Image: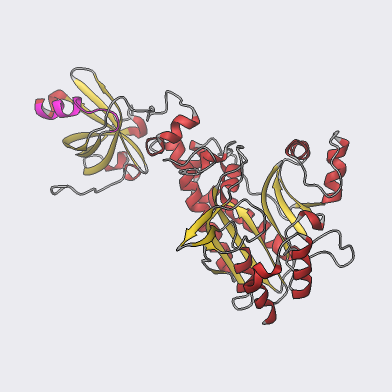
Amino acid sequence: MRGLRRTHYTDQLGPELDGQEVVLMGWVKDIRDLGKICFFVLKDARGTVQVTAPKAVVGEELYRVISDLGRQYCVAVRGVVRAYPEAPGGFEVIPREVRVFSRASYPLPIDPTGRTPAELDVRLNARVLDLVKEDVRAIFTVQHEVLRAVRDFLSREGFVEVFTPKIIATATEGGAALFPVDYFGERAFLAQSPQLYKEELTLSFERVFEIAPYFRAEESHTRRHLSEFIMIDIEAAFADAEDVMDILERLIKHVFEAVKERCRRELKLLGREDLEAPEVPFERITYDEALEVVRAEGFDVPWGEDLPTPALRALGAKKPGFYFITDWPTASKPFYIKPREDRPEVCEAFDLMHGWLELASGGTRVNDKELLIRRLKEQGLNPASFEHHLKAFDYGMPPHAGWAIGLARLMMVITGKQNIREVVLFPRDKFRLVP
């Protein structure tokens, strides 16, 4: 950069620096040339600042460099801060030197100022440029703070962060929604969950969590499904569904509090200044009670079936906040969920909902090997395919429970976005493999 080094980000400037020389680096957001004076807005990762160049002050040569700038040019500005009440923020920068690092090609596929709206597909096709808009970038700054809060909370609760394989030989939860992989001539799959590994790790670490990408080759093309997604998973030894529901609701409350404290600027950009942390404990309703509600709304859902989206919307209209649905039919949940001893047709499973949107699933796990084998067979799965997992149950598998929450769906709730693709940097679905 030939001797120039940034001294400040834009959010570190203010009228109190009047008269101080600074070096800024970023991109031209917008520019106006009025003949004898030129204004441009410089943006960086933290904000914007107005650069004001009167021709009589900066001279003909520098004025020509500035007037030749275009939107999205990458530049460095060396200049002096001037307190000026009429400028945005009460100050501006008078340039002494402007250096162009790179130019942008025209026309740009989308308007980086955001004044001309673009359809979501158009934005995703030019995602790198879309992210220069402050309100879009704010989503992912919030996500960073969400993940930091999650790690802080779970670490304080005694959980150890782990990483499990993403190339596997056996379907974790059965089903056909798997992406096959040629693994040195053998058939393998991309992992759809860390479920079996995290259960096995309770035998040694007792409490583990993982934040990682997973993959499901589902045909669903909705505003809440993707083929690649980030999950936050936990598993805890010597715990049941009630214990991990308590952890989950306290985690959600902590995340909301952290975001509200650390992301005031981003929440304002997203129109979410009114975000409040939910009260705990969350309401708990059973599957049977949920069924009564949706049937009263005219949905004829047979007992034992999952709740279809229209029925969930009706339920969410009555319960717009966070709540748990518990005691699901055993046959509707994966083989590793423990049936209730007093009512085996119902299991110790739960879903965390926000309105109509499912955010997390979890429950008490089966820790008895013979029961697990029976549950595998009941779901049409071959126990031989789970040989390595079943061996762990010969080594003193503790009672355990856990859950998984989708990061993107949690981000939808926090940011108020209605399409999951808006809260993922480079979403993958049936129709999108690039960029």
| Relative to 326, 140 lies left or right | left
106 vs 4: above or below: above
Q: How is the image coloured?
A: secondary structure
Q: Would you say residue 65 is visible in this rendering?
A: yes
| Relative to 141, 193 lies left or right | right
Q: Nearer the viewer, residue 150 or 167?
A: 167
**Displayed quadrant of residue 83:** top left
Residue 338 included in the magenta stretch of the image: no
**Displayed quadrant of residue 291:** top right
Q: Would you say residue 396 is visible in this rendering?
A: no
Residue at 60% in and 56% down: 254
Magenta stretch: give its range: 61-72
Q: Residue furthest top?
A: 35
Number of numbered discs present? Answer: 0
Q: Position of residue 304 (x, y in %)?
A: 83, 50
Q: Position of residue 237 (x, y in %)?
A: 68, 73
| Relative to 109, 220 lies left or right | right
Quadrant showing the C terminus: top left
Q: Nearer the viewer, residue 67 or 164?
A: 164
| Relative to 141, 178 lies left or right | right
Residue at 65% in and 69% down: 386
Q: Nearer the viewer, residue 111 or 58?
A: 111
